[in-house]
Amino acid sequence: GEDVEQSLFLSVREGDSSVINCTYTDSSSTYLYWYKQEPGAGLQLLTYIFSNMDMKQDQRLTVLLNKKDKHLSLRIADTQTGDSAIYFCAESTGGNTGKLIFGQGTTLQVKP
Amino acid sequence: NAGVTQTPKFQVLKTGQSMTLQCAQDMNHEYMSWYRQDPGMGLRLIHYSVGAGITDQGEVPNGYNVSRSTTEDFPLRLLSAAPSQTSVYFCASTLAGRGGTQYFGPGTRLTVL
């Protein structure tokens, strides 16, 4: 079945760039998403990319999609302590019906 | 708009008890979903609905029932709670169309003793 994999932990220094990686299996996914979850809170949509795009940039966030390798990455430029959170990659499945398959989440720790 | 609301925020149940987790959205979204979040496992889809009167199973539906009598509400029922259902439950609604952006509620933390 569909599966989404992420590394579990990333630690960076404040001001550095962070790159969080994700691989997925469903080649028919229309959209791929990045969500952020702060402690005790729900999920906040950061950005998404349509499957026919290679790159999407939104302020400090850059999403890269390699559809051939089924690899998605999220780059956060000038990482701040407020970026410390869990980041989830997700792929859409079953068309645009709200069915998402999530990765396990990557905990980003930003050291001052 | 209040967005997606969930009640209660916290709940403790004994094994075998039943309860309903409430979810409502005021954005007129057609699609709604329930997920559970367990440590190290991300979010897993329990049930989803593409419109009033239409529901379907997700990845982990056993032990849960849903119904969708109105566009706004999508309650999740636990008929006989088990310790394995201890988790954080998130409801989400989706704007149909470009991006299928999902909006998540704040979650319900459920403990089954």
Image (cartoon, coloured by chain):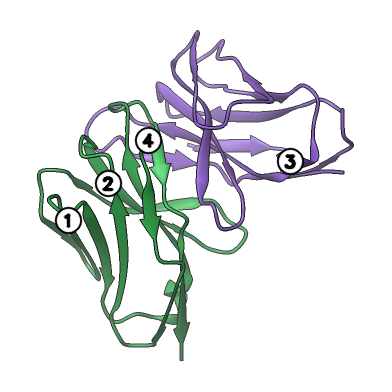
Chain colours: A green, B purple
Q: Position of residue B57 (x, y in %)?
A: 51, 22
Task: Using the rendered view, name the quadrant where residue A19 is placed.
Answer: bottom left
Q: Where, by quadrant of the figure, is residue B28 drawn?
A: top left
Which chain letter matches label 2?
A
Q: Which mark is residue A32?
A: 2
Of the residues tagged 1 and 4, which is closer to the observer?
4
Of the numbered discs 1 and 4, the one sitting upstream in the chain is 4
Do callouts 1 and 4 mark residues in contact (Cβ within 8 Å)? no
Residue under label 3: B84
Query: Marks 2/3: CA distance?
Result: 30 Å
Chain ID for label 1?
A
Residue type at numbered disc 2? Leu
Label 3, secondary structure: give it: helix
> Element at badge 2?
strand
Q: Secondary structure at mark 1?
A: strand
Q: Earlier in the sequence, mark 1 or mark 2?
A: 2
Q: Residues within 10 Å of mark 1 (few under 14, many from 20)?
A: many
Residue holding disc 4: A1
Disc 4: which chain? A
Say which of A3 and A19 sits in front: A3
What residue do we see at 47% from left, 36% from top?
B1
Q: Using the numbered discs, state the Cα–Cα distance from disc 3 to disc 1 in whole angstroms.
A: 36 Å
Three-letter residue code for mark 1: Leu
Q: Which residue is mark 1?
A: A65
Give the CA distance from mark 1 to mark 4: 21 Å
Task: Judge whether A48 appears above or below A27 on screen.
Answer: below
Left or right: A92 in relation to A35? left
Amino acid tagged 3: Ser
- How far apart in space, not on screen, are marks 2 and 4 (Cα)? 17 Å
